Image (cartoon, helix red, strand yellow):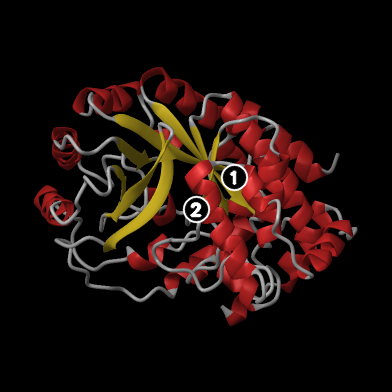
Amino acid sequence: MSNMEESLGKQQNVGLEGFLKKSYYYKSISKIMSIIHSKIPLGDYDTKAVASPTNIREELFDGVNYKRAVMYLMSNGCEWALKGAHGCTMCGHLAKQTRMGEEISVDDYLHQFEGEFEKIDFKEYPLLSLFNNGSFLNDNEIPPAARCEMLKKINANPDIKMLVLETRPEFTTEEKVKEIKALVPDKYVEIGVGLEVKDDIYRTICVNKGFSLRQFDSAVSIIINHLNLRTYVLLKPPFLTEKESIEQAIETIEYAFAVGSTTVSLEGCTVQDYTLVKYLNDRGLYSTPWLWSIVEVIKRLKTPGNLIVGLFQFYPPPHAVPHNCDQCSERVIESFHQYNRTLDVKVFDEITCECKKKWEEILREKPLPFEKRLEMIMREINTSDL
């Protein structure tokens, strides 16, 4: 066991916050992300308007394929990204949340929400995801009064069948979850949490997620006692190989179902502006996962469950997404749409391409051990060119 693994293994005992303060890798990554984020141009946004138009997706719910409306509120910004840790390595939300002026008021939140809410025909789109590019349960991001009024309005609409919200574990309290249950008693509600990777080492170093598995488990126990849990799993964060990413994703999905997740969303990592992933990608130190890797994870999963594939429809839009070759990428992505409509893995049976051989060769490669690989990449990073 390496020194880094030994130190990380003690997280559960000494606390993640204490570990982060001592970690060389964490400090280095945090410094790099701080410089990257300092380049974000300040914007003067319309706080009475949503961050982007409502996005429409498809999802199987209660045995029926429905369309899901995804609303992105212009918010006060993710507190984890705005704090000294500088957020997650792949997340580009901060680039569209850095505003000049005061925090968004309750009235402005309700104005933007109600304006967008009235545009949606929930008879046609009966599933709703309400996202604030951060934690919906954090009072510093969404004021309680605004949260309360939005949830009441959602509950009052008879055509909405399902509501999805998102939060980080540290904002998941018994009081908050019970409040949502009381405000939306007539809907099926899922609280989404980005576990990303089960392994504390990889989640800390590769994603800079800022919480331990024990903290995730604690939030899970609260959520599933009152509502339903949607867990996000990230495929191929920086510093992991293609093969490691597949293995970690499978392990994480299995774990998510084991602890009580109703839905697991497999998210292939994308490249977004003002992120560590973008910096590494621009310098040939990172590449997005193959679509074959997503297929492999789905086909190898042993635990049956409601596993869906995130289809890279992020806000802000990414520069690069998971892909294969030009001849098959579009066809494979369409198979993901078909899979999400049915959750039937047989949709992948007839899909193949010559590029799959190249992917298989990559999986057979023998990379350096994780810590040595990480050290090598960190040496390649030159903060003077940030």
The answer to whether one can see residue 22 in this image is no
User: How dense is the environment of label 2, judged by Cα within 10 Å: few (below 14), some, or many (20 and up)?
Assistant: many
Instruction: Please give the label number shown on residue 20.
Output: 1
Quarter of the picture containing the C terminus is bottom right
Type of amino acid under label 1: Leu
Q: Identify the image quadrant of the N terminus.
A: top right
On the image, the x and y values in percent for residue 344 come to 59, 42
Residue 90 visible from this viewpoint:
yes
Q: Is residue 339 left or right of residue 190?
A: right
Q: Give the amino acid at mark 2.
A: Ala
Using residue 98 as the reference point, say whether residue 108 is left or right of it.
left
Closer to the camera in the image, 44 or 146 = 146
Q: Which residue is mark 2?
A: 85
Is disc 2 in contact with disc 1, using a CB cutoff of under 8 Å? yes
Residue visible at 41% across and 28% down in the picture? 228
Marks 2 and 1, the one that precedes in the sequence: 1
